[in-house]
Amino acid sequence: MQGMDYVYAVWQEKSFSAAARKLFVSQPALSASVRKVERELGLPIFDRSTTPLQLTDAGRAYIEAAERIFRIKRDLKSYCDDLAGLESGTLRLGGTNFFASCFLPPMIEAFSRRHPHIALSVTESDSADLFDKLTTEELDIIVDSGVCDDSLYETVPFIRTTSCCPCRQPFPSTSASPSTD
């Protein structure tokens, strides 16, 4: 990228010496870097016989491509900054039927309020399929009660519960025969 930056600075300044001053490099070092780019292209970028410097046809194509690359680089930086701040992107969630219907909706609602620019996708499937999708990076997070290999996945318990089933006392024995009275 340095060669591209140097070529672009020479084009902006229309002069090798002015570009060298702007870049804080020596003029011979700048010239050598531009010549290296021209050798790689196999064509001259600048018409050095004119003052101020002019672009050749290859030079115009190079500058147009450089501007697209600089724009892509800026866009990528902005996108990555947004991702780091949870301002854009996609989060792919998975859950078994029970978790997808009972737990994910309120979690999704709360997350969407905090991060409205993050797109969410939800996959409902069985545990084995969800873990396969997590392994192949088709999903980012799954919510499941299944047992998994903690050496392969980071697990975060989000609920601990004790279940009970109330029944009348004394609990009728399954071996007792029903009364025929």
Image (spheres, grey):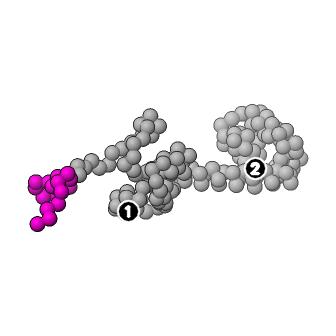
Q: Nearer the viewer, residue 98 or 110?
A: 98
Q: Secondary structure at mark 1?
A: helix
Q: Is residue 96 above or below residue 35?
A: below
Q: Position of residue 102 (x, y in %)?
A: 34, 61
Q: Which residue is mark 1?
A: 101
Which comes sooner in the sequence, label 1 or label 2?
2
Q: Is residue 92 magenta?
A: no
- Determine the residue positioned at 32% across, 49% down: 158
Q: Which residue is mark 2?
A: 11
The magenta segment: 165-181
- Determine the residue positioned at 70% across, 54% down: 67
Left or right: 95 with respect to 57? left
Task: Name the amino acid type tagged 1.
Answer: Ser
Q: Position of residue 3 (x, y in %)?
A: 73, 40
Mark 2 burial class by Cα count in 10 Å: few <14, some 14-19, many 20+: many
Left or right: 72 with respect to 10? left
